[in-house]
């Protein structure tokens, strides 16, 4: 690749560092255009010097763009095609937040594998996924694209997702670097402010997992870090990303985020932004062209800039080589991929991603006369946000599905006709947010379940018929006022193509729910941000002292905690034992716990192991998830589940950003059990 680099003019080099959508090459492909793209200021010659393409509809379109491009390109360096395969390509997997509810890394990896196959078949070579932004504010619309509030879960699932893509040959771009999930007040694109310690200890974990698994690219975030936009932030892109995380791949801006530095008022004009970007370590500029327009002159003046450009171009050429585009720019072999198992992967994942939060009478019996109500009874678009190539036509409505699979002819559905509802024995109310109520630019100030639903629930509850609510949502919602009227509550964060099958299979007990919440559900939205792994306060809550951590009007407790989730089986946890109560780093305890399924139904449960460092030189969380295992138990079966503690489980960053372990007392928690050990 170095020889090829030498042959390129400066214009051709800068082209390799620029990404534009397909319609620039073929005008008929024009779609909606926002932001800097409306005025790219690119000549025809410039367009055919660019290096990568944002979004492609299918393999034919890719072929068309690639062939037209190669005809005109001097060195025949193929374009590389990237796009947002966030949770599936044609077959839509559960959203990342839903996948996180499964606590099943292996199914998450298999989902990514299936999505990768479909993506390659569509003509893509890179996906802009995983989104590894730690998310603790449910008002933020993008929590649905994340793995939730826990750094360890984020780390593991980001890792498995990348492994899944990689095993099929799809390259991946982890995003948004860094700490985008901390957008103030949950507003997308807002300011982020956090300490380096918070970044290293908690917010980096997801990206770290993806990078360790071999993510090929990193996308910068829209926010600032330490008052400098991430896209031009040298500390983030060089010190943290390249030195600390040892990332060797290609960096890319988010959509016009380089030019947005002008709006942040840290770049005076597009040429200033371009110089700041290349100096900071930004390789590809997405959806704007300041590199192409400004860096030639800058490189002429400053050989250091030319050197940085060469390094960036080399990384891009290596990426194209990795995508095997020099062997076959059309990646024709991808057309032959067998992606037929995608539905199965989506079903398995979705089954484990639905969460049961309250249960008095599920599962239902087929003979029960049911009223199925709510907009999701008949809503076809159940795929969730970012379901780009997914077609709602491929999915069944819940009503159709339940009717076909679970009901006899004598039973029917009624629409808010109280007289008719009265004649049934159970109400299923399928409600919640539509797909466009979460995702990018879809933050909300009010995440209470709509008062309209609460009124409806109150009225329905007067009929004295048990009510099952199935909540479709892209975020935790405040359900406090609704809960008293609900007998059974199933929640999911949009399950994709298999939604209706999984929802009905779960209501009728074909699927025994095993999901757990990856984000805390607040009791009141004034509690936000609320997350389980908070730090200890100097004034912990006490009934007797008025000067403690509390609200005057709401308790400190969430409505549903991170990790909460019920099953139709009844699991008990006993005999939490540590192999040794005094440990050294070379002899860390093995933790054992006996889990029993006390019920007559086979089920899966996730054993969550939390650790509390009782005393440390910097404040440590009240507890932190360090390991988990999901197991299946037959009726009345018991299993002893073992965890081997590791140094990583006990270590943390100190104020100098050094990862250390301090001797002292640690407490292990599993469900309602706890045990202590001392590290010498
Ligand atoms: C903007 C989004 O923030 C990012 O997640 C996405 O990958 C890009 N647009 C490209 O579509």
Image (cartoon, rainbow, N blue to C red):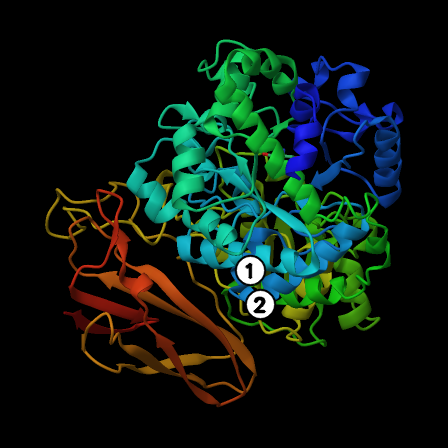
- Residue 651 shows which numbered tag? none
Where 661 sits versus 236, above or below?
below
Can residue 572 be seen?
yes
Front position in the image: 111 or 571: 111
Viewed as shown, does residue 329 lie left or right of 531? right
Viewed as shown, does residue 596 lie left or right of 610? right
Between the residue at mark 1 and the residue at mark 2, the CA separation in whole angstroms equals 7 Å
- For residue 71, what is the image quadrant? top right
Question: Is the CB–ligand 1 distance for label 2 below 8 Å?
Answer: no
Residue 27 location, x and y as percent? Answer: 86, 23
Viewed as shown, does residue 542 lie left or right of 457? left
- For residue 641, what is the image quadrant? bottom left
Q: Where's the N terminus, which quadrant? A: top right
Q: Where's the C terminus, which quadrant? A: bottom left
Front position in the image: 103 or 586: 586
Query: Which residue is found at the position 13% from the left and 44% from the top?
Result: 546
Give yes or no for contact between labels 1 and 2 (Cβ–Cβ under 8 Å). Answer: yes
């Amino acid at each position: 690749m170095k020889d090829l680099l030498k042959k390129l003019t400066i214009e051709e080099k800068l082209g390799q560092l620029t990404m534009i959508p397909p319609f620039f090459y073929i005008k008929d492909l024009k779609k909606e255009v926002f932001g800097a793209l409306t005025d790219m200021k690119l000549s025809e010659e410039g367009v055919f010097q660019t290096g990568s393409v944002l979004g492609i509809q299918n393999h034919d379109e890719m072929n068309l763009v690639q062939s037209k491009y190669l005809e005109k390109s001097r060195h025949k360096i193929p374009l590389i095609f990237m796009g947002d395969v966030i949770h599936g390509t044609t077959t839509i997997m559960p959203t990342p937040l839903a996948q996180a509810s499964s606590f099943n890394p292996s199914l998450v990896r298999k989902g990514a594998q299936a999505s990768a196959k479909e993506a390659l078949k569509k003509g893509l070579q890179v996906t802009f996924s995983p989104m590894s932004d730690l998310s603790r504010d449910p008002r933020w619309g993008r929590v649905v694209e994340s793995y939730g509030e826990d750094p360890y879960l984020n780390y593991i699932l980001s890792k498995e997702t990348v492994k899944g893509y990689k095993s099929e040959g799809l390259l991946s771009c982890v995003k948004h670097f860094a700490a985008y999930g901390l957008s103030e007040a949950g507003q997308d694109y807002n300011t982020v402010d956090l300490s380096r310690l918070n970044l290293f200890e908690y917010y980096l974990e997801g990206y770290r997992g993806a990078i360790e698994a071999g993510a090929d690219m990193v996308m910068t975030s829209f926010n600032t870090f330490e008052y400098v936009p991430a896209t031009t932030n040298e500390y983030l892109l060089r010190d943290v990303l390249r030195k600390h995380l040892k990332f060797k791949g290609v960096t890319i801006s988010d959509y016009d985020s380089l030019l947005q530095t002008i709006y942040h008022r840290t770049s005076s004009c597009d040429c200033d932004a371009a110089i700041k970007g290349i100096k900071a370590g930004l390789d590809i500029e997405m959806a704007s062209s300041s590199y192409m327009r400004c860096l030639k002159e800058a490189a002429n003046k400053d050989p250091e800039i030319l050197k940085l450009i060469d390094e960036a171009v080399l990384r891009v050429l290596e990426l194209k080589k990795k995508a095997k585009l020099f062997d076959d720019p059309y990646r024709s072999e991808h057309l032959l991929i067998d992606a037929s198992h995608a539905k199965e992967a989506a079903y398995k994942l979705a089954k484990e991603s639905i969460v049961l939060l309250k249960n008095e009478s599920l599962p239902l019996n087929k003979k029960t006369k049911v009223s199925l109500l709510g907009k999701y009874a008949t809503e076809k678009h159940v795929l969730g946000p970012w379901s780009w190539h997914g077609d709602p036509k491929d999915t069944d409505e819940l009503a159709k599905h339940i009717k076909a699979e679970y009901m006899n002819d004598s039973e029917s559905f009624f629409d808010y006709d109280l007289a008719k509802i009265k004649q049934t024995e159970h109400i299923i109310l399928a409600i919640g947010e539509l797909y466009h109520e979460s995702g990018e630019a879809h933050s909300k100030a009010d995440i209470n379940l709509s008062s309209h639903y609460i009124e409806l629930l109150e009225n329905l509850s007067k009929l004295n018929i048990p009510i099952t609510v199935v909540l479709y949502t892209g975020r935790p919602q405040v359900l406090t006022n609704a809960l008293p009227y609900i007998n059974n509550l199933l929640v999911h964060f949009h399950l994709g193509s298999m939604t209706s099958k999984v929802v009905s299979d779960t209501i009728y007990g074909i699927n025994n729910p095993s999901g757990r919440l990856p984000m805390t559900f607040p009791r009141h939205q004034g509690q936000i941000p609320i997350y389980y792994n908070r730090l200890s306060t100097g004034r912990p809550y006490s009934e007797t002292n008025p000067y403690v951590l509390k609200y005057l009007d709401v308790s400190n407790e969430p409505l549903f905690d991170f990790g909460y989730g019920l099953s139709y089986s009844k699991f008990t946890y006993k005999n939490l034992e540590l192999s040794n109560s005094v440990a050294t780093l070379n002899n860390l305890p093995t933790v054992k716990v006996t889990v029993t399924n006390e019920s007559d139904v086979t089920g899966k449960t996730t054993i969550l192991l939390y650790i509390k460092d009782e005393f440390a030189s910097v404040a440590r969380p009240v507890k932190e998830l360090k390991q988990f295992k999901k197991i299946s138990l037959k009726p009345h079966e018991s299993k002893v589940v073992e965890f081997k503690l590791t140094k990583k489980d006990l270590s943390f960053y100190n104020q100098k950003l050094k990862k250390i372990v301090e001797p002292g007392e640690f407490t292990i928690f599993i469900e309602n059990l706890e045990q202590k050990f001392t590290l010498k």
